[in-house]
Amino acid sequence: MPTQLDAARIDGIVQQIADRLPGDWLLVGGGLVALWLDRRRVTEDIDIVGIEGTGAERLALLGLAHDLGLPVEALNSAADFFVHRIADWREQTELFRRGRAGRVFRPTPTLFLLLKLGRLSSLDLEDCLGLVRRCREEGLSFDRARALVALGSLPASEDEALVRRRVRLRAALDAGAEGD
């Protein structure tokens, strides 16, 4: 049975990464959503990427998962595939947590949207809407034009539910609100 990680558990694990693993890390996905956008969010794994993209970083994550009594899949670095597809991703990160050994970054709102909109599952849409809402409430900015261009350049889909989610996200980006 998969492990369900809530915000408190994710917070502790992310702190362990910052305290025990040297270097810089990028937290993305549901783990970030639980800590940054919606504390009610749970996830089965924490998507975290070593900034340098080395095998040693991956092994360090696996070792930490083992040391913490987690399944090794609980610390997932596969998101690096998607992160590295965005040309300026390194410039699109912000410090999120500093520890004794390392630092954990999060994507800027722009990078967050770019990472989510390719798949745009129902949960991804809710995450994006939550981000747009947070940006509006806190006066955070994101590159709306870039997100709209990326959304508009996605291949056409015959999945009607996906098409509706894309329309809803476009409306939210156009309005700077939830799009409801």
Image (spheres, rainbow, N blue to C red):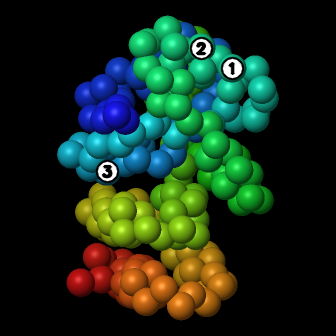
Mark 2 lies on a secondary structure that is helix
Q: Is any part of residue 125 visible from this angle?
A: yes
Instruction: Classify 21 as above or below 27.
Output: above
Q: Nearer the viewer, mark 3 or mark 2?
A: 2
Which image quadrant is residue 143 in? bottom right
Instruction: Classify 82 as above or below 158.
Output: above
Q: Which mark is residue 24?
A: none
Is 165 left, or right, of 93 in this rendering? left
Mark 3 lies on a secondary structure that is helix
Q: Quadrant of the C terminus?
A: bottom left
The residue lying toward the viewer, choosing from 141 and 160, is 160
Which image quadrant is residue 36 in? top left
**x, y (%) of residue 159?**
48, 86
Instruction: Classify 89 as above or below 43.
Output: below
Q: What's the residue type where badge 1 is placed?
A: Leu
What residue is pinned by disc 3? 37
Mark 3 → mark 2, Cα distance in angstroms: 28 Å
The residue lying toward the viewer, choosing from 178 and 67, is 67
Q: Of callouts 3 and 2, which one flags the residue occurring earlier in the amino acid sequence?
A: 3
Q: Nearer the viewer, mark 3 or mark 1?
A: 1
The residue lying toward the viewer, choosing from 106 and 58, is 58
Mark 1 lies on a secondary structure that is helix
Q: What's the residue type where badge 2 is placed?
A: Gly
Residue lying at 76% horizontally and 32% vertically, measured from the top left: 52
Please report contact status of discs 2 and 1: CB closer than 8 Å, yes or no: yes
Label 1: how many Cα within 10 Å (few below 14, some 14–19, many 20+)? few
What residue is pinned by disc 1? 59
What residue is pinned by disc 2? 63
Q: Is any part of residue 139 visible from this angle?
A: no
